[in-house]
Amino acid sequence: MARAEHMADEGTAPVPYVICCEGLHLETAPGTESGAGEPFPVELSAAVTETLFQLHGREVSGPVMVKVSDICIHGHALGKKGYLVCIFPGADAGAAYRCYAAGLAQLTNGRVQLVTHDRFPGRPLPERVLLQGPVATPQQARDIFVRFKTLVTASLPAKKALFFRLACAELAANTLRHGKHGRMAIYGHEQGLVILAEDRGPGIPLHLLPSSLLVVGYSTVTGSLGAGYPTIIQLSESLTIATGCQGTSILAFLK
Amino acid sequence: MHVDITQEGSHVVVSPMGDLDFTTRDVLESEIRRILNQEALRIVLDLEQVRFIDSSGVAGLLACCEDATLAGVTVRIRNVAPELMEIFDLIGVRSVLPFE
């Protein structure tokens, strides 16, 4: 996102689309700088175009995400499991964000909603808060997690409580690992619970969002399994996320 | 979390007790590393007293197995509670864990 803003600031002419893939970057229009990440190999760019043609036909106008494992070069699949490509028109940050939002919604049947921070749902009503607290230190994260365990084991069937605790643990671990000034709040919602996890860390770069959220085994942190977000998403009825330079906010609805 | 260590013939049996999660994985990992320094041949990870695990805990288990393999030590996991198995399935790691 920082990159897209940078391009917009410089008044670069809009490009037909930008393809992002795990830090690899390709602009299909010549003359635009390639920015962060390695240059996208020409051969790969041809393969991506070919794959898109096969999957979506000649007219690709909206946002499209493609698994890199679907991409073939000379008849051979790239074989990089789970990598995803997102294509978006233009180069301004807002358009990129909207396209990733549409792509994530498409890949998750609408369960994952990516929104900008100003569209993120407001804080829960105070009377609905069941527990809340800072998650800036391991002790604070543990504290929230232990209080959550007490809350759900007392009020929910065993299996539900187990999965809710798993979602809480993954959110707490992520908040602690990636963010500064982390906070979590749990509140009641219809027949379920909502967990709000917020941090003021650096945010997740847009081009890493699909893999980070959906691909098990994808992680930017050594010693991490890369299963945190995918697990949270599996356990959530729906999940709203806002991420950027002001941090990451997640609202997970558990039912 | 508390980790119990017992000897069973030529095996070292490591029995963590409590939740194996993002706040406790380090405890298990450092115990395993300590044992690996003592020339064990085979480690049995007995999970009977573990009722909850998260992806950090799973990562900890896998790190233990990797450390052991590098040290030429075999690790086997036993006595996995059904609820733990459900979490392994959900995270998708059942097939990569070395069950006894």
Image: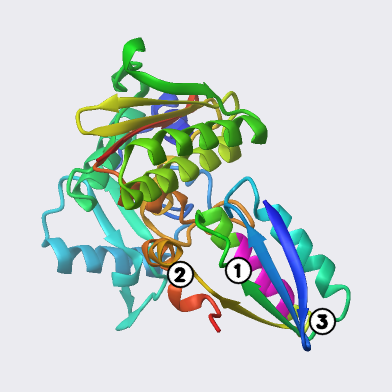
Which residue carries the number 3 mark?
Answer: B40
In which chain is the residue bearing label 2? B
Amino acid under label 2? Val
Q: Earlier in the sequence, mark 3 or mark 1?
A: 3
In the image, residue A37 sits, relative to residue A192, either above or below, namely: below
Kindly report which numbered mark, 2 or 3, lies closer to the viewer in this rendering.
3
* Residue at 62 percent of width and 29 percent of height: A140
**Does residue B64 belong to the magenta stretch?**
yes
| Apparent side of residue A56 relative to residue A225 in the rendered image (left or right) | left
Q: Which mark is residue A74?
A: none
Residue A68 occupies quadrant? bottom left
Amino acid under label 1? Leu
Question: Do the CB atoms of the residues marked 2 and 1 lie less than 8 Å apart?
Answer: yes
Residue A200 occupies quadrant? top right
Farthest residue, direction right:
B38
In the image, residue B50 sits, relative to residue B78, either above or below, namely: above
Amino acid under label 3? Ala
Between marks 2 and 3, how big is the CA–CA gap? 26 Å
* Residue at 21 percent of width and 46 percent of height: A63
In which chain is the residue bearing label 3? B
Kindly report which numbered mark, 3 or 1, lies closer to the viewer in this rendering.
3
Q: Nearer the viewer, residue A72 or A186?
A: A186
Q: How many marks?
A: 3
Which residue carries the number 2 mark?
Answer: B93
Residue A121 in the image, given as x and y percentages of width and height: 29, 21
Query: What residue range appears in magenta?
Result: B60-69
Residue A39 in the image, given as x and y percentages of width and height: 49, 56
Q: Nearer the viewer, residue A95 or B28?
A: B28
Q: Is residue B66 visible?
A: yes
Residue B85 in the image, given as x and y percentages of width and height: 42, 67
